Amino acid sequence: MLKLLFIGDIVGRPGREIIAEKLPRYRTEQAIDFVIANGENAAAGAGITGAIARSLLGCGIDAITLGDHVWDQRGWENEIGEIERVCRPANLARACPGWDHLIIEARGFRLGIFTVLGRSFMGLKADCPFQAADRMIEQLRAQTDAIIVEIHAEATSEKIALGWHLDGRVTAVLGTHTHVPTADATILPKGTAFICDVGMTGPYASVLGREVRPVVARFLDGMPRRFEVATEDVRISAALVEIGASMAHAQKIQLVTIIR
């Protein structure tokens, strides 16, 4: 049995700090084999930088995935190709810089990872996530012992549909982007672990990681405001997946919350 911890969207400095404080010990105590984290909100709540990516990788994270905020930080398009354990969404244009998948290894077991962006209610232009996932699975099947798919999407229906579409062909389909952990973690009939959203790693006394007052005020009067990252009630939210190494099917999935 192998254990995978998939950490939901890391939001700003509070999210980075709790990763540094809590993840190394948790990984050791729980004998985690693989740690993957979505880092697309790690830099002030929007995007990521090379320095932040390297810092997170030094805290016990094996691979970092990204989402629709992938290009928010100036100059990141020039850095992304230099960091081997960070990948951008696989259904962006093929001309985009950066890796469209990662392969990491533990105990002789090769794990492939890629992200697809949803297209419902999402601003960043992307190809069909279903067709992109099919293409990536075909590409990775001979190179890996198991495949993890992240669906970074707004619409619950789109995430659930992709889970059913890939059931039995990948080990897990894990949703991110909405920053709210969902209560639907399950093993689908053909052995694929699924959850609509892993949640966020950051401040929960907030509106999706941002200070409450300016967000509420924006809803009331529609005037533009700066939404700073909040600081209170910081948690790690993650999915813990147990993988049967012989068949690469998921045996168990559960939502994990780690508090300060």
Image (cartoon, rainbow, N blue to C red):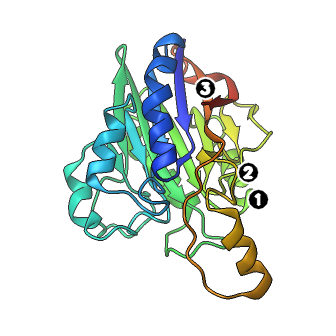
What amino acid does circle 1 point to? Answer: Ser
Front tag of 1 and 3: 3
Q: Which quadrant of the view contains residue 156?
A: bottom right
Q: Is residue 155 left or right of residue 14?
A: right
Instruction: Check disc 2: other Cα within 10 Å, few if <14, some if 14-19, many if 20+.
Output: some
Q: CA distance from mark 3 to mark 2?
A: 18 Å
Q: Are marks 1 and 3 in contact (CB under 8 Å)?
A: no
Residue at image position (71%, 80%) is: 218
Q: Amino acid at mark 3?
A: Val
* Position in image of residue 167 (x %, y %): 66, 39
Mark 3, residue position: 241
Q: Which mark is residue 157?
A: 1
Looking at the image, do the residues carrying marks 1 and 2 touch, with CB atoms under 8 Å apart? yes
Q: Quadrant of residue 57?
A: top left
Residue labelled with disc 2? 160
Amino acid under disc 2 = Ile
> Residue 222's spot in the image, x, y percent?
72, 87
Q: Earlier in the sequence, mark 3 or mark 2?
A: 2
